[in-house]
């Protein structure tokens, strides 16, 4: 067999098959003591989804689908790095993970986490196909993906059908934990409603009441719900929408939309586009002189947009999940930034932050449930207990599985104010999450069944 | 936003969009017309032209050099692609040709992604052409105005090559009946190679000319390919004047529809293509295929 | 040595075997006709010689050089020209462009003036596009386009088919003039009278096999052969 000591006395349930798998795991690299690995089998639960098949060995598999091509590719790569760092930290029992999930020693319930990555290209059908494969072939115990709410909503449905927990990646649509919410899906990051509720007062204070706004909106659930939330909140201060330019995801050119905006007489341009669409539309807005006529606002911050647009975000207000300079206030953020930058050579953006924290939260819930049995894990989330995160204490709402967490309002720094080349934003305000949330049933959420 | 100044602005913008589409499409259509191969890597050629120009620009700081290097690089790439791969597919079924060019396109995009990552790269327009110009009825980016002129010159040059040179005469004959051209003692395979090079160059040239307008990403050619394909179908497969007409029509449809409801711009584009296919199956200026 | 010597030629369209061991020869300055029913393999024979169809087996010696398996443009450069049954005029090119393009790679060529003397109608229509020509004019252009290259041998595939009698008469005269001037011609034609008037020697092909060979005069005296293979 192997040289590892399995201490048979403390591992009564280790079958020959488990031993063989553990042995096979040794060849591949590190493996955890089988004594811990066996714990999950002590539970007496019926099979559901990939349980218990997914944890019968010494490892547990996570299916990751992020866009690595297409308009959201840059953000997807950042997100993926966050996932990889989280998995590395969980498997090694890193100090930061232990701060968020105190019961974690190494792995999750002693299982080493393994993962597969698929390119979703931000397309729902590709993400669903990949995750279906991870579930049936790799017995994934958890799936993740996003960087497009269309993908998130599709994976919500897949998760509920397959009874495999879905920890949502970047998704800004109200629908993800609204009308398309599911029992098996959880979202950590901020979204249209909270973004609007947090940034609207800042905009009203900054630009005044009764302003005319033009919107650039991508044509899918994310764009429509974020624009709607912004319109609703700003209307309270008398703001009107003079034009809403809806464009397809990955539009190659924004000139005709921008001409409409230029001719609309708006005071403020609210750009809801995301990923490369946001970069391109912002650059072209500059080319068409639109940014000289009106103020730009980005209600749902796009990672790396400041770097990619070369100065166009200067003075621009944006709402975001995370900005690295809050590390002065949050020690966990500092730990995360340091670990991330050491491994990848740049400051993490909020895609990586969301990825990391959502995995850490999941690991904590499984540890607290003491089992991978999905209904137990879900119920651990639904306790709604206060959890640490990189932006202070947060909790998940049992009614819609949305994490109640602060929204960070930032403003692009002028070049002369930047202390280093990644110091793009000044943090204006960290708005507590509780006051930003809609009523749990406001967006039509009906969580499905546990089994 | 339906008012007179906006309408005129959109009409003009449609012209600018259409001119670029016309140039890219003319490359696709002469390749298809002559070789009978629909080059699904054409969008990748457009993208590579942009990147080749970007690299040249980074080293030399000269936009003109970037345009020349970008075009020549893509032409050489087109010739190499034809010599090494495409020529083995002339006698294979169309599905095989589609698959091999589609696959090549993916390879090119991923190679570029590997080298340059997905982050967008910026090629600034030449200093002279930066800023905004007032046309009276609208303010328009100066560089985009220049693009209209540059593209018009490029299309004019293509026209002269096609209609005023021996090579052009051979290409036009080859678009109609390449077998007959071969039977008249002209090595049609060498013509294929040249046409592929010129067609690719048209896309590469457009790619670098367009780079300051769009910020480059590896996927920049993907959507263009779809639009280009629509243009070729509308104008008539294998027809150079058809590509120009189709390009302008597509540009105007996108621009004018956007004025009423941007969400329908592409719907209208495809609706127009369907309408053309129903009324004139060979496209507006196309003729019966040679096969 | 014959100008053209074909031995054991086999051609296929996809999987269907069209020509079976076709052998024939054509002497210099000779007019040879290939007769046969529709689908007998006449056009395929001509296309196989020209390299438009690539024969799978057999030899084609042309002016002392093996040309079977070569590309059409090589065969054209060796001095052969095929006038297709469908004429295959470049419709978007002018009449004159059609003639110029044919001569581009020829080692020696007829001056356009000589072409226009032979076909005055083409001179009148030199600026017109190929698609604007009548059927007869297109046929003239197709023949003229082959002649521009001053070919050692010209293969005519049904040159008179579907044309008005008055045009056929003009074209016949042109062919006779060519023959008298020493042009080597292989003719495939349904019009038996015209064929027998032009040709010196006849091959009959049936189901892809050469079944008869002989001087044109001799065939006229053998109505049973014509009856059996041509149904006349």
Image (cartoon, coloured by chain):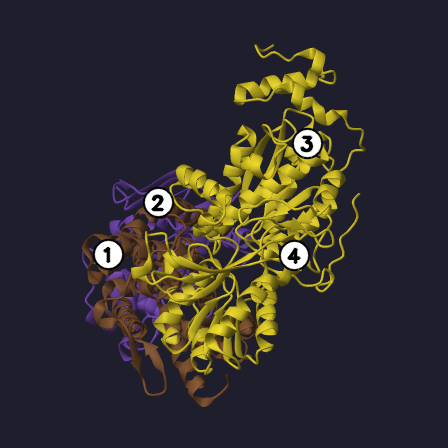
Chain colours: A yellow, B brown, C purple
Q: Nearer the viewer, mark 1 or mark 4?
A: 4
| Residue C4 appears left or right of A188 | left
Question: Which numbered disc, 4 or 3, marks the residue that appears first in the sequence?
Answer: 3
Q: How many angstroms separate mark 2 from mark 1 (CA)?
A: 16 Å
Pointers 3 and 1 within a single chain: no
Q: CA distance from mark 3 to mark 1?
A: 52 Å
Locate residue C229, reporting x and y percent. 53, 51
Tell me if residue A154 comes above or below residue A108 in the rendering.
below
Can residue A38 be seen by looking at this rendering?
yes
For the residues carrying marks 3 and 1, which lies nearer the camera in this image?
3
* C-alpha gap between disc 4 and disc 2: 35 Å
Residue A311 on image: x %, y % = 34, 62
Q: Where does residue A415 sit, x and y in percent of width and height?
A: 31, 61
State which chain disc 2 sits on. B
Question: Which residue is tagged 1?
Answer: B57
Q: Residues within 10 Å of mark 4 (few under 14, many from 20)?
A: many
Sequence order check, earlier mark of 2 and 1: 1
Camera-nearest residue between A284 and B11: A284
**Residue C65, located in which quarter of the rendered image?**
top left
* In this view, A344 is above or below C171: above
Which residue is rendered at x = 59% and y = 29% of the image? A107
| Number of the front mark, 4 or 2 | 4
Mark 1 neighbour class, 10 Å CA radius: few under 14, some 14 to 19, many 20 or more: many
Task: Please tell me the numbered disc located at residue B115.
Answer: 2
Q: Which residue is mark 4?
A: A176
Callout 2: 10 Å neighbours few (<14), some, many (20+)? few
Q: Secondary structure at mark 3?
A: helix
Local SS, label 4: helix
């Amino acid at each position: 067999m192997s040289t590892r000591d399995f201490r048979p006395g403390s591992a009564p349930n280790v079958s020959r098959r488990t031993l063989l798998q553990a042995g096979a795991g040794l060849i591949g690299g590190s493996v955890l003591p089988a004594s811990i690995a066996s714990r999950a089998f002590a539970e007496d639960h019926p099979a559901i989804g990939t349980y218990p098949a997914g944890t019968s060995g010494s490892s547990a598999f996570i299916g990751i689908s992020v866009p690595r091509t297409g308009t959201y590719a840059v953000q997807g790569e950042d997100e993926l790095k966050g996932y990889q760092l989280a998995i590395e930290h969980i498997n090694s029992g890193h100090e930061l993970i232990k701060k968020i999930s105190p019961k974690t020693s190494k792995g999750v319930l002693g299982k080493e986490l393994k993962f597969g990555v698929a390119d979703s290209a931000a397309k729902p059908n590709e993400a669903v196909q990949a995750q279906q494969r991870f579930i049936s072939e790799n017995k994934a115990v958890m799936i993740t993906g996003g960087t497009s709410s269309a993908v998130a909503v599709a994976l919500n449905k897949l998760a509920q059908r397959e009874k495999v927990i879905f920890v949502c990646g970047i998704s800004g649509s109200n629908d993800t934990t609204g009308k398309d919410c599911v029992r098996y899906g959880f979202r950590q990051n901020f979204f249209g409603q909270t973004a609007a509720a947090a940034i609207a007062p800042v905009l009203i204070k900054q630009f005044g009441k009764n302003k005319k706004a033009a919107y650039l909106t991508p044509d899918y659930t994310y764009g429509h719900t974020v624009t709607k939330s912004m319109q609703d909140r700003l209307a309270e201060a008398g703001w009107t929408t003079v034009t809403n330019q809806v464009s397809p995801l990955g539009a190659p050119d924004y000139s005709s939309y921008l001409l409409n905006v230029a001719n609309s007489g708006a005071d403020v341009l609210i750009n809801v586009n995301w990923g490369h669409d946001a970069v391109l539309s912002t650059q072209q807005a500059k080319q068409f002189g639109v940014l000289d006529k009106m103020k730009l606002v980005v209600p749902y911050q796009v990672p790396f947009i400041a770097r990619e647009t070369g100065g166009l975000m200067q003075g621009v207000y944006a709402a975001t999940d995370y900005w690295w300079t809050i590390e002065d206030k949050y020690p966990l953020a500092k730990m995360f930034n340091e670990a991330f930058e050491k491994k990848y050579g740049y400051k993490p953006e909020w895609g990586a932050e969301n990825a990391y924290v959502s995995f850490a939260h999941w690991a904590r819930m499984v540890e607290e449930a003491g089992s991978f049995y999905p209904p137990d894990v879900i119920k651990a989330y639904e306790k709604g207990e206060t959890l640490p995160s990189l932006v202070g204490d947060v909790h998940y709402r049992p009614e819609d599985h949305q994490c109640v967490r602060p929204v960070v309002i930032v403003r692009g720094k002028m070049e002369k104010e930047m202390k280093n080349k990644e110091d793009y934003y000044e943090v204006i305000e960290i708005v507590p999450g509780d006051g930003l949330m809609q009523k749990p049933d406001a967006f039509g959420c009906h969580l499905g069944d546990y089994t | 936003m339906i008012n007179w100044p906006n309408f005129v602005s959109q009409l003009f913008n449609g012209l600018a969009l259409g001119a670029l589409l016309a140039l890219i499409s003319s490359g696709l259509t002469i390749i298809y017309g002559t070789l009978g191969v629909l080059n699904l890597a054409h969008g990748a050629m457009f993208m590579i032209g942009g990147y080749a120009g970007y690299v040249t620009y980074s080293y030399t700081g000269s936009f003109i050099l970037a345009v020349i290097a970008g075009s020549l690089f893509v032409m050489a790439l087109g010739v190499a692609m034809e010599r090494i791969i495409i020529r083995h597919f002339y006698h294979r079924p169309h599905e095989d040709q589609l698959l091999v060019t589609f696959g090549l396109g993916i390879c090119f995009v991923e190679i570029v992604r590997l080298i340059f990552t997905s982050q967008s790269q910026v090629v600034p327009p030449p200093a002279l052409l930066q800023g905004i110009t007032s046309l009276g009825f609208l303010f328009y980016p100066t560089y985009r105005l220049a693009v209209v002129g540059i593209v018009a010159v490029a299309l004019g040059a293509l026209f002269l090559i096609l209609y005023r040179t021996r090579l052009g005469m051979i290409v036009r004959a080859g678009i109609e009946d390449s077998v007959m051209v071969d039977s008249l003692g002209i090595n049609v395979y060498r013509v294929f190679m040249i046409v592929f090079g010129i067609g690719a160059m048209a896309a590469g040239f457009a790619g670098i000319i367009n780079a300051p307008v769009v910020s480059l990403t590896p996927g920049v050619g993907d959507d263009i390919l779809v639009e280009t394909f629509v243009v070729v179908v509308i104008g008539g497969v294998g027809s150079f004047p058809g590509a120009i007409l189709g390009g302008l029509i597509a540009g105007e449809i996108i621009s004018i529809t956007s004025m009423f409801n941007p969400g329908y711009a592409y719907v209208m584009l495809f609706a127009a293509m369907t309408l053309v296919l129903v009324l004139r199956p060979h496209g507006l200026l196309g003729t019966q295929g040679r096969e | 040595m014959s100008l053209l010597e074909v031995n054991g030629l086999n051609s296929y369209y996809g999987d269907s075997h069209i020509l079976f061991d076709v052998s024939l020869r054509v002497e210099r300055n000779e007019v040879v006709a290939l007769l046969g029913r529709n689908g007998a393999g006449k056009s395929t024979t001509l296309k196989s010689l020209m390299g438009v169809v690539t024969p799978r087996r057999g030899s084609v010696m042309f002016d002392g050089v093996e040309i079977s398996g070569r590309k059409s443009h090589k065969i054209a450069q060796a001095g052969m020209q095929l006038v297709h049954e469908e004429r295959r005029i470049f419709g978007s090119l002018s009449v004159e462009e059609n003639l110029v393009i044919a001569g581009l790679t020829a080692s020696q060529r007829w001056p356009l003036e000589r072409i226009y003397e032979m076909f005055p109608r083409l001179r009148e229509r030199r600026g017109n596009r190929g698609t604007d020509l009548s059927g007869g004019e297109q046929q003239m252009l197709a023949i003229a386009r082959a002649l521009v290259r001053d070919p050692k041998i010209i293969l005519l595939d049904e040159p008179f088919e579907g044309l008005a009698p008055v045009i056929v008469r003009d074209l016949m005269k042109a062919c006779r003039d060519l023959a008298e001037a020493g042009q080597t011609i292989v003719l495939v034609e349904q019009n038996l009278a015209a064929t027998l008037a032009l040709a010196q020697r006849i091959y009959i092909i049936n189901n892809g096999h050469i079944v008869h060979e002989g001087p044109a005069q001799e065939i006229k005296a053998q109505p049973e052969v014509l009856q059996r293979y041509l149904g006349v």
